[in-house]
Image (cartoon, coloured by chain):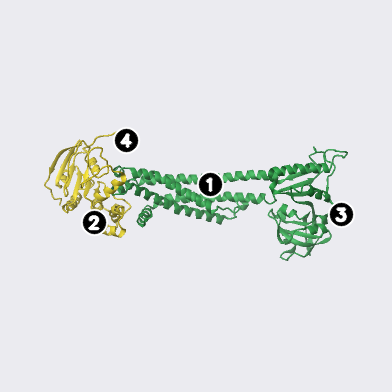
Amino acid sequence: MFSRDRWLEIFDTIKKNKLRTFLSGFTVALGILIFVVLFGFGNGLDNTFDKYFKDDALNTMWINTGRTSKPYMGYKANRQIEFDNDDLKDISSRFAFYIEGITPRISTSANVGYKLKSNNYSVRGVAPSHQKNEMTIMMKGRYINGLDVENKERNIVLGRLVKEDLFDGEDAIGKFVFGEGRSWKVVGVFQDDGGDNEERIVYVPYTTLQLIQKNTDKLRQIIISYKPELGYGGAVAFEDQIKKYLKKKKFIDPRDPRGIRIRSAAKDLKENDQFKSALSSIILFVGIGTLLAGIIGISNIMVFVVKERTKELGIRKAIGATPRSIIGMILQEAIFITTISGYIGLFIGIGILKLVGNTLEEEYFITDPYVDLNTGILATFLLIAFGAFAGYLPAKRAARIKPIEAIRDN
Amino acid sequence: MGSNSLHVLKGINFNVNEGELVAIMGSSGSGKSTLLNILGMLDLLDKGTYDLDGVPIKDLDETKAANYRNKFLGFVFQSFNLINYKTALENVTLPLYYQGVNRKVREAKALEYLDQVGLKEWATHLPSELSGGQKQRVAIARAMITQPKVLLADELTGALDSKTSKEVMALIQEINKSGKTILIVTHEEDIAKMCSRIVRLKDGVIMEDKRNKMVKAI
């Protein structure tokens, strides 16, 4: 099988039957190429999906307050519910088992400036664990920390675009910006994958903000990150418990849908997972379909090739070729051609994906299309195996035909 | 093809001695090609015996038949049956390839045999670039290169004009003179007369089997 003479004979046949070689090679190369490109684009879609939906941490629960819609226990309807800093402590001690981090969020906006430049930005008063909820990435310096909150420090963390607006190229850490009639020390600059708006925000300790605004300890929004081990079921149960607890604590009718609203990513997470698995199935389906088309293509060509060579095979048999050597020759040739062209297709495909890169991100939502090499090699191997198999059956039949029948004139 | 069986040869008994040049004659349907196919192990006999050089040819599986053909027999066909994408030289070397002979050796030997049939200069030409007579001579060189015990020719002049036929037959006679046993299937009297023995078949039986005073082809 691996004798030099056999290879020379095969190279000779390949060289002298260029059209045939080209056709079978082209089918395989094209099959693999389309597979790689489609599969890569599919993965690119998947990447985009991850990018858009994984900006906020998925184990997050937002607790918002509003006005009640039902009178309850002597309280009138339409009462504005508010938390205070003690509620924060109560929640974290009572639900310690479930909670990974807890932070309030006080949202406002303010004119923030440095030297001659100033602009209006969203301001958020938060606690340290807020960083995890928003998946805020620190570029420089640090986030709001526990001491800031405790001491009501006038420290501020700037979004990347805020820093660019106000400081240009200048280093911002340690400088003082002004806002709300006071000066604030910049302790960090952050970036966020959630888009430009997420980077036009500044963060300050919530206690400082409470002090400056009205010197109260009122809160409207609490964000909890629960332990991811809870899973979907645990998260839903936790949501129920905390809702009951808070309604009782704030004297809200248990049947009142207003007053306290809880939004959790658990449901989103489940829907996202379903969507993602649907997307993955489609990608897999497209991949298998392309591969199947390639397999059928190469099978057809092998049948045709053997048919075309029937007479030649008959002549070879008449002058002493054994059936084994006939089958071996056809298979070796087929495997050789499919292997070479399969890998050519594989690498052109990967090349195209590299070339495309992120150019399709904006319009077609394809980010970083890729195929991992193992998948590509597996696909190529499959095509080779099926090509060989498809060649084997007709080759076996051809090897069995009596030479006299094969070489007869008609 | 198909399952319907047909008795073509109905009891044929004859011996060919070493060095004979035998013409097997008969109209179409007389069974002459079937006889040749059996002798050439291209077809199987369902009854009777066939000894070649003292070796009984029986129970042939495909591989064994292929090896015997390669070792004992040379074929020349009416339609030449050269492989069309191989040069004259490569066509002639092919039987030796299946014997596992080294490439250099088989090329040298093929060139020698092409020289014998007068086509050394045409060694690198493809069959499509050769005339009918030249193709048949390449086929004869290919049949001879394994130094077979018997050369079997099936209507080898059937596709050639009479002048070329004579040239090819002259080559056959020359090969025969060197001691090679040759069987020729033909339906042309002219060709038969150039052989040393003529066997006439009709409806699957031998009608006549006589010695012949060989007429020189040229």
Q: Residue furthest left?
A: B213
Residue A256: x and y, percent?
Answer: 80, 38
- Residues under numbered marks 2 and 1 in contact, where contact means CB atoms less than 8 Å apart: no
The chain to which mark 1 is attached is: A
Residue tagged 3 = A215
**Callouts 2 and 1 in the same chain:** no
Sequence-wise, the earlier of marks 1 and 3 is: 3
Residue A217: x and y, percent?
Answer: 85, 52
The residue carrying pointer 3 sits among few (fewer than 14), some (14 to 19) or many (20 or more) residues within 10 Å by Cα, namely few
Q: Quadrant of the C terminus of chain A?
A: top left
Residue tagged 2 = B113
The chain to which mark 4 is attached is: B
Of the chain colours in the picture, the one used for chain A is green
Residue tagged 4 = B2
- Residues under numbered marks 3 and 2 in contact, where contact means CB atoms less than 8 Å apart: no
Q: Secondary structure at mark 1?
A: helix
